Image (cartoon, rainbow, N blue to C red):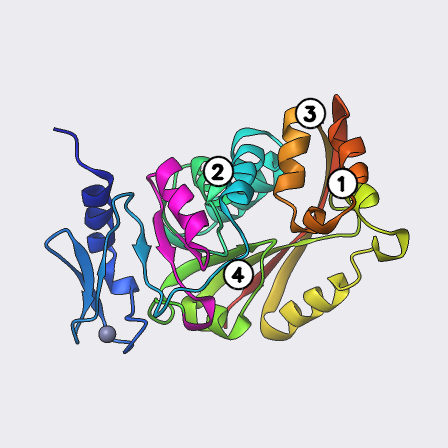
């Protein structure tokens, strides 16, 4: 009989249970009866049928729904739009001088970035954990990708012990630098991906009024990152990739900006047979002292 996703996940988590911390009382946790993760004070969290863990103290309603995460999975997981980004990050990981690398993706959504990065590993063994506050995202991640450990959790009170990750990645998603510093090992890396001015410019041009088009908070994001970590590198990554009509439609669905935009303008974008789309990002690499 093949093992269920729930059992497989419980086995993997049990190997790495030292990483976890009870969101209620902060104590250590362990897997019990291949069924749940439990702390010293018996706060208990069951593995779901799909294999993920929900370690929220109480549920939080997210604006991001199934449609958005499905669209993201198509675009990020099934096209080559972000392939170069994934390759760059895999290369950075492969240069780390460790046999096994523990990596946390904060704000992983439906997990496609983390999955692709882990697929690209060279000769290194990676243990991946994806964390997101949106249950819909983690549910989909667990359905699609078995390898990483998927956790619904709050970044402001991340359910992990201090200094347990060799690498924390944070791709196009909000940060909590105090928590990042707590989570990443001493000398470990924080890899944050932020948009530059022309990121998805073709889409933003049709969605936004011209004066708003610029990504105006970019420099602030970079300098805030540099305030917290010794920034060892800033790698700009700019390229264009052609997408067909179906993928253009998914790109709109995965972009919250588009939800309040004029439907006619969106239609003009999604009616194109194909379009070149610009990826324009900064990869910031910081070291935890
Ligand atoms: Zn507890």
- Badge 2 marks a residue whose secondary structure is helix
Counting residues from the start of the chain, the first of labels 1 and 4 encountered is 4
**Residue 187, image x and y in percent?**
46, 66
Is 193 magenta? The answer is no
Q: Residue at x 55, y 40 (%)?
A: 72
Instruction: Tell me the CA gap for discs 3 and 4.
Output: 35 Å
Near mark 1 (Cα within 10 A), the count class, few <14, some 14-19 or many ≥20, is few
Q: Nearer the viewer, mark 1 or mark 4?
A: 1
Counting residues from the start of the chain, the first of labels 3 and 4 encountered is 4
Q: Which mark is residue 245?
A: 3
**Residue 97, image x and y in percent?**
42, 52
Circles 3 and 4: CB atoms closer than 8 Å: no
- Badge 3 marks a residue whose secondary structure is helix
Quadrant observed for ligand 1 in the rendered image = bottom left
Q: Residue at x 76, y 40 (%)?
A: 263
Q: Nearer the viewer, mark 4 or mark 2?
A: 2
Is 289 on the left-hand or right-hand side of 264? left
Q: Nearer the viewer, mark 3 or mark 2?
A: 3
Near mark 3 (Cα within 10 A), the count class, few <14, some 14-19 or many ≥20, is some
Q: Which mark is residue 116?
A: 2
Instruction: Tell me the CA gap for discs 3 and 2.
Output: 23 Å
Q: Which residue lies under the disc numbered 1?
A: 263
Instruction: Tell me the CA gap for discs 4 and 2.
Output: 18 Å
| Residue 228 visible from this viewpoint | yes
Q: Is mark 1 within 8 Å of ligand 1?
A: no
Q: Which residue lies under the disc numbered 4?
A: 190
């Amino acid at each position: 009989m093949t093992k269920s996703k729930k059992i497989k996940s419980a086995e993997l988590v049990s190997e790495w249970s030292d990483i976890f911390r009870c969101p209620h009382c902060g104590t250590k946790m362990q897997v019990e009866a291949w069924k749940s993760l439990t702390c010293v004070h018996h706060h208990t969290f069951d593995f779901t049928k799909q294999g993920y863990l929900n370690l929220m103290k109480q549920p939080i309603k997210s604006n991001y729904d199934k449609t958005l995460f499905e669209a993201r999975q198509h675009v990020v997981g099934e096209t080559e739009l972000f392939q170069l980004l994934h390759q760059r990050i895999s290369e950075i990981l492969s240069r780390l001088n460790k046999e096994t690398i523990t990596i946390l993706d904060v704000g992983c959504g439906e997990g496609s970035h983390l999955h692709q990065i882990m697929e690209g590993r060279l000769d290194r063994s990676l243990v991946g954990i994806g964390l997101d506050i949106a249950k819909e995202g983690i549910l989909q991640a667990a359905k699609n990708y078995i390898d990483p450990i998927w956790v619904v959790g709050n970044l402001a009170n991340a359910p992990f012990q201090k200094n347990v990750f060799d690498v924390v990645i944070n791709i196009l998603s909000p940060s909590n630098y105090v928590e990042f510093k707590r989570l990443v090992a001493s000398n470990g890396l924080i890899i944050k991906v932020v948009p530059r001015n022309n990121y998805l410019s073709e889409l933003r041009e049709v969605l936004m009024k011209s004066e708003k088009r610029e990504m105006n908070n970019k420099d602030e994001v970079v300098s805030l990152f540099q305030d917290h970590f010794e920034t060892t590198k800033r790698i700009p990554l700019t390229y264009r990739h052609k997408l067909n009509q179906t993928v253009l439609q998914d790109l709109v669905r995965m972009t919250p900006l588009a939800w309040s935009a004029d439907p006619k303008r969106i239609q003009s974008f999604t009616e194109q047979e194909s379009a070149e789309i610009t990826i324009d990002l900064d990869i910031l690499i910081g070291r935890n002292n």
